Image (cartoon, helix red, strand yellow):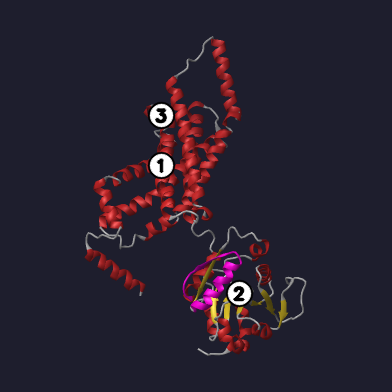
Amino acid sequence: MNSNPSNAMALTSTTSNKKETVCIFGTGDFGRALAYKMIQSGYSVVFGSRQVQISSLIPKGAEVLSHTEAAQKASIIFIAIPRQHYNFLLPLAEVLNGKVLVDVSNNLKLNQYSQSNAEYLAQLIPGAKVVKAFNTVSAWALQSGTLDASRQVFVCGDDKKAKQMVMDIVRALGLTPLDQGSLLAAQEIENYPLQLFPMWKFPIFLSLGLIAFFFFYCLIRDVIYPYVNEKKDFSFFIAISIANRICPILALILLALVYLPGVLAAIIQLYRGTKYSRFPDWLDKWMLCRKQLGLVALAFAFLHVLYTLVIPIRYYVRWRTNSGVISQALNNRTDQFNNSNAWLSDSYLALGILGFFLFVLLGITSLPSVSNSVNWREFRFVQSKLGYLTLILCTAHTLVYGGKRFLYASSYRWYLPNAYMLSLIVPCIVLVVKFVLVLPCLDKPLTRIRQGWERNPRYSEQSHYIINKSAV
């Protein structure tokens, strides 16, 4: 390592209240937004630019100098220019020696280059200490202060002290740094902003597939069947009735799918007798998107509540109610109050209200701002214990809604059961298997396995060898 003054300055972070001077190469949107945020946080900012004239777009308080002069005034330099223009840094290699270069660039498509931009920059200026950061934060969010959805800043670099200096700046700007390790992680960090809802693809595609299936299923039973057999046109059911059947069905199924991979993982661990073995890839991916599955399920639950609230004002419902009253008056009869039906109706509504309340609680707890304020035990209690209670209440809500109708032949149109019966399959399987797993004869060995006990250590050693060999 070359022991020159710039080296010492690059690896010395300020400990006083006075913030250091930061240099930014590039006066584009992101460079100006970053400077604006840094000036607000107490930093002195100097721009390195080809044109040293101060533009009206430059934040007030920032200085504009040539690249060489600006680099000499700061120990940390933010490279806010596209990769294709990095070559202009080559004549500045001597000035940049020992400096901390923060690469904030992004590409236009995934894996656009075989080498990440940050690694390419480190190769161009080998004497500098390159850190990848800030590429996941937008210029608009920095300048407007709307950072609630993008407070996390991924940081990676080979030099620990340089990386720590950048993470200190991240915290000073009111953001949360996430250390991703060495510069080898830069490729993944650069790909992250280009991924369109990477963890949401499976939940969204699954939801769309279930919507299509249950829509046509309900269309056949509730619209086509009456028209063919009774010559009645119920096509208007598509707008509210069928939609209000699909939403609770998807909410219940998706909620059950949140807890099904955990049950499958427990069975696999019991079968293998160890926790030191990888799950199948499909199960790993499924478990990683459980939060997204739960949030999509909550969205369908919300839609179900909204659709249910408008039922009393529907024309069809008001027409049936009025027709029933007129029919009783004309026939001089009154339907007797049925206490059993009243209990079923109130129980159905009470279970739905309680289930939806816990559903919302699960959704709120999954928010980063809330989950970060509770410890692991509290989070697990809400997401696991209350989660299964939510699934039980929602399943009971559906069962009470159906009542004894599954016994009636009229419930099977063209031998097709009511759609709510199909929605009970996955939740009931999850709850039954979970009930079996909590039995002492299975729960105790499963707990021991998750604490590190192994039934067959040789199997575990082989698994460790395979995993380590694949890692190498």
Q: Relative to 457, is 338 on the left or the right?
A: right
Horizontal and vertical percent for residue 373? 50, 55
- The question of residue 179 being in magenta is answered with yes
Taking the image as drawn, is residue 150 in sight?
A: yes
Q: Is residue 414 above or below residue 171?
A: above
Q: Is residue 269 left or right of residue 73?
A: left
| SS under mark 1 | helix
Give how far apart the Cα atoms at labels 2 and 3 are: 71 Å
The earlier-in-sequence mark between 3 and 1 is 1
Which residue is at a point 24% across and 47% down the rendered structure image?
441
User: Over which residues does the magenta segment extend?
Assistant: 159-182
Position of residue 385 measured from the top left corner of the image (x, y, whole percent): 39, 46
Q: Earlier in the sequence, mark 2 or mark 1?
A: 2
Quadrant of the image containing the C terminus: bottom left
Closer to the camera, 69 or 85? 69
Q: In the image, residue 7 lies at what x, y percent?
A: 56, 86
Look at the numbered discs 3 and 1 and tell me whether their residues touch, using CB distance below 8 Å.
Answer: no
Which one is nearer the viewer's eye here, 363 or 281?
A: 363
Q: CA distance from mark 2 to mark 1?
A: 52 Å
Q: Which residue is mark 3?
A: 403
